[in-house]
Image (spheres, grey):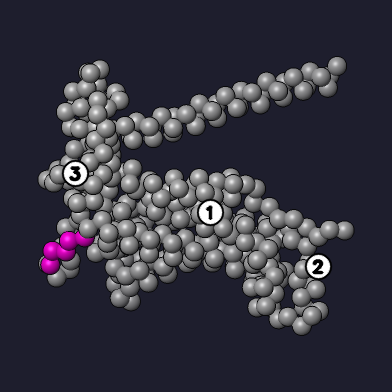
Amino acid sequence: MKTHKLRERKSIFVICIGVILVLYALTFVLLFLWGLSTSLKSDINYYFDNTGIPEGWPWEWEWKNYPEVFRNFYLIIVDAEGNKLRYTIEYQLMYSLMYAVAGAFIKALIPCLVAYVAQKWDNMFSKILYTCVIVTMIIPIIGSNASMMVIMKKLRLFDSFLGVYLMQASFTGFYFLVYYGVFKGMAKEYSEAATIDGANEYRVLFSIMLPLAKATFATVFLIMFIELWNDYQTPLLWLPTHPTLAYGVFDMGRNTSNALSTDPMRMACCMIMVLPILVLFIAFRNKIMGNLTMGGVKE
């Protein structure tokens, strides 16, 4: 009887959680549909539709908004020497890919390598690495941008992708702990068998351990790519003459002097920017939403 009541309580709890998650997911779906419908409206339709509010469906689908975005989505940036530079959407897309793809790979690889070292050898150095990660996660680092800006300019790394890539090469954070748990959960028979066959540590790492952790690495890479693709603050601060799409959308939101100053055109820009993320999520949703776990050795 007690077991039956406990199961009923668990079922009610699971149903309640499921309803909450469904409602939460619907908020994102409705926002996306609202943005899509707004991007396909004319200015008159948006401000004076048949419902009296701008949230109604379009009278006519204004597909020409998207070609208009590609023609007029550009940035005018003044460099350090006072020259005006014009960046079209093609340049912004190129810089976005350079920033997001390479940056995501670095942010996924560095904590993976450090976590392997910290888990592989049980010594004082490994304990210091692990402690540094925990401490940096507990204690927030605030106000370091000013000193970092001075250092980057002294090293001539400011406004360059090399400088940004070096900034991304950090092993601290949550994903260090994810990799640490993955490597710790792997059976030692893998590396021991390779060592017996004469493989050195580099061969064991790159031929045995990293391929076994490729599912976790791919998941972290995808999450980091989405994060960097949507990031406009870092390019705005550290790459002022290499604007990304996120940088351009941010600037467009405060610019009222061009053809994209209306809400439907701005929303069309946002839809163009969100399209790669949507395609990636649909294509790799199983990896993103899957378990970050590894299997063991068959007995």
Q: Image point 26% across, 56% down: which residue?
A: 89
Q: Position of residue 167 (x, y in %)?
A: 42, 66
Q: Is residue 86 magenta?
A: yes
The residue closer to the viewer here, 134 or 1, is 1
- 257 on left or right of 234: left
Give the residues in magenta: 83-87
Q: Which mark is residue 137?
A: 1
Q: Image point 33% across, 35% down: which residue?
A: 36
Q: Is residue 122 above or below residue 53?
A: below
Residue highlighted by disc 2: 189
In the rendered structure, which amino acid carries the disc numbered 3?
Leu
Q: Image point 67% across, 78% down: which residue?
A: 203
Residue highlighted by disc 3: 260
Q: Is residue 167 visible?
A: yes
Q: Which corner quadrant holds the N terminus?
A: top right
In the rendered structure, which amino acid carries the disc numbered 2?
Glu
Determine the image quadrant of residue 96. Answer: bottom left
The residue closer to the viewer here, 39 or 104, is 39
Q: Position of residue 218 (x, y in %)?
A: 56, 58
Q: Nearer the viewer, mark 2 or mark 1?
A: 2
Give the mark, 2 or 1, whose residue is nearer the N terminus.
1
Q: Image point 68% across, 56% down: which residue?
A: 181
- 167 on left or right of 285: left
In the rendered structure, which amino acid carries the disc numbered 1?
Met
